[in-house]
Amino acid sequence: MSIRTKLILLFVSIVALILTGTSAAVYFFSASNREEEFYKRLENKAKITAKLLIEVDEVTPEVLKRIEKDNPTSLPEEEIKIYNTEDKVIYTSDMEGLIGVTQPLLSRIRQRNAIHFRQDEYECLGFVYMDRGGKFVVIAAAIDRFGMQKLQNLRTILIAVSGIAVLIILLSGNFYVSKALEPIARVIHDVDDISATSLNRRLEEGDKHDEFSKLAHTFNEMLARLEQAFTTQKTFIANASHELRNPMTAILGQIDVSLLNPRSAEEYQIVLRSIREDLNNLITVSNRLLLLAQASTADVEKRFTRLRLDQLLWDTKAELIRSHPEYVIEIDMDTSLDDEGKLEVHGDEQLLKGAIINILDNGCKYSPDHKTWVRISSSDNRTILNFHDRGIGISPEDLPYLFEPFYRGKNAKTYKGTGIGLSLAYRIIKSHLGDIEVETTVDRGTRVIVSLPRPSPEI
């Protein structure tokens, strides 16, 4: 069932329930008022009749019958019976015995002084009439044809009005819900027209004050994120393919050239060394792409453990110097880090090593002296790594794109590299809830500041 149909049914059901309750209340109070008014008239008429018979000596039962016969105040089908103190009838207009009176009924009337009861169509009233001669029992009965007819007419009117009102509400509710859901229908239509090739399109946000405008705005923000993700993905795939294709093309080219003619052992060694270098570059790119994918997964925190940051630094330094003996890395620790807990972080060892290696490698590779300084310090429950070099620096126009994959600064084109290093470090640090900042001056060096939170005691 569609939301439109549900809203219409809900709206009509609520209004129908309110109308039914209101009509029932009107009918109930009208019926109660009719009954109260009828019994009041019946009681007054019966008291007047009893007073004439009991208190006026000149009025006999026969005279009273003649008086009541043409009395315009008499009620429809009115019957009155009066019993003396010995429960004997002293007056009755019910010659046909339509109102049955028993001894238990008379006793109950005397006990309660007044009761209401029904016999077939007759509404009956019994009460005790006090006089100097004793307690008389008066029983009066009549049929309220006029009142019941009015009540029946009221019931018919209420049912007809409620039915017509529900029908009108159904039609107006359909119109109202259709108008109210029109923005949703427009959003659905616009979203259906958006595909992977048209993520640049946006939804109409209207006046930006109601919930539908907020929904359209939320969709637009999502589309912007999707467009950015698609663009990044396409750029990443294109750049990754390029970076992987270059060394493989170079390897294939060298192999084809070496196979054209017989070569000496020395020439083959030169070719193999060149191929080995290209393969190392290919492995480096593949490893960094793998780390980049691992840093982007949603469940990266599941692999986190307690790690010593100083130990990570020493391990990465040793690993980096093994492959690049010309690199010089100096590690300095703040004297305030005497507490072992200040050197701990909660993270993935492989990823953090990858981030540190890429930062150190950039610092040494782009510096004429191949030297980088690292200082470990602490501040506000965070451990800070401060990397500093005297390399070529980064130009101001390249800074906004520093952490994008495969982006390389204009002054770094002459150096071997893939442009993955800093983007990889950025994603790894962010996945560990850390921060990374870069301060740089062209031809004077670069400072990379990494801040990582220390693990809470319960981890």
Image (cartoon, rainbow, N blue to C red):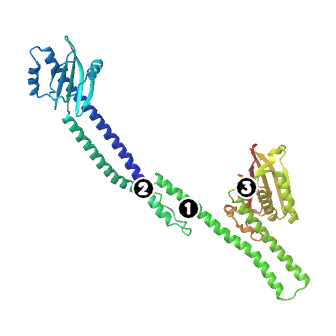
At label 3, counting other C-alpha atoms closer than 10 Å, the crowd grade (few under 14, some 14-19, many 20 or more) is many
Q: Is residue 208 visible?
A: no
Q: Position of 107 compared to 176: left or right? A: left
Residue 78 occupies quadrant:
top left
Q: Earlier in the sequence, mark 1 or mark 2?
A: 2
Give the residue number, with chain letter if any, for mark 2.
Answer: 4
Q: Spatial distance from mark 1 to mark 2, Cα to Cα?
A: 26 Å
Q: Earlier in the sequence, mark 1 or mark 3?
A: 1
Quadrant of image for the N terminus = bottom left
Q: Please name the amino acid that badge 1 sits on.
A: Leu
Q: Position of residue 266 (x, y in %)?
A: 91, 82
Asked if the residue at tag 3 contacts the one at tag 1, i.e. Cβ–Cβ closer than 8 Å, the answer is no
Q: Position of residue 438 (x, y in %)?
A: 73, 57
Q: Secondary structure at mark 3?
A: helix
Residue 79 vs 19, above or below: the answer is: above
Residue at 50 percent across and 53 percent down: it is 214
Q: Earlier in the sequence, mark 3 or mark 2?
A: 2
Q: Is residue 83 visible?
A: yes
At label 1, counting other C-alpha atoms closer than 10 Å, the crowd grade (few under 14, some 14-19, many 20 or more) is many
Give the foreground label among 3 and 2: 2
Q: Please name the amino acid that badge 2 sits on.
A: Arg
In this view, the residue in front, 106 or 256, is: 106
In this view, the residue in front, 446 or 74, is: 74
Give the residue number, with chain letter if any, for mark 3.
Answer: 429
Residue 131 occupies quadrant:
top left
Q: Spatial distance from mark 1 to mark 3, Cα to Cα?
A: 27 Å
Give the residue number, with chain letter if any, for mark 1.
Answer: 223
Residue at 84 percent across and 77 percent down: it is 274
Q: Secondary structure at mark 2?
A: helix
Q: Please name the amino acid that badge 3 sits on.
A: Ile
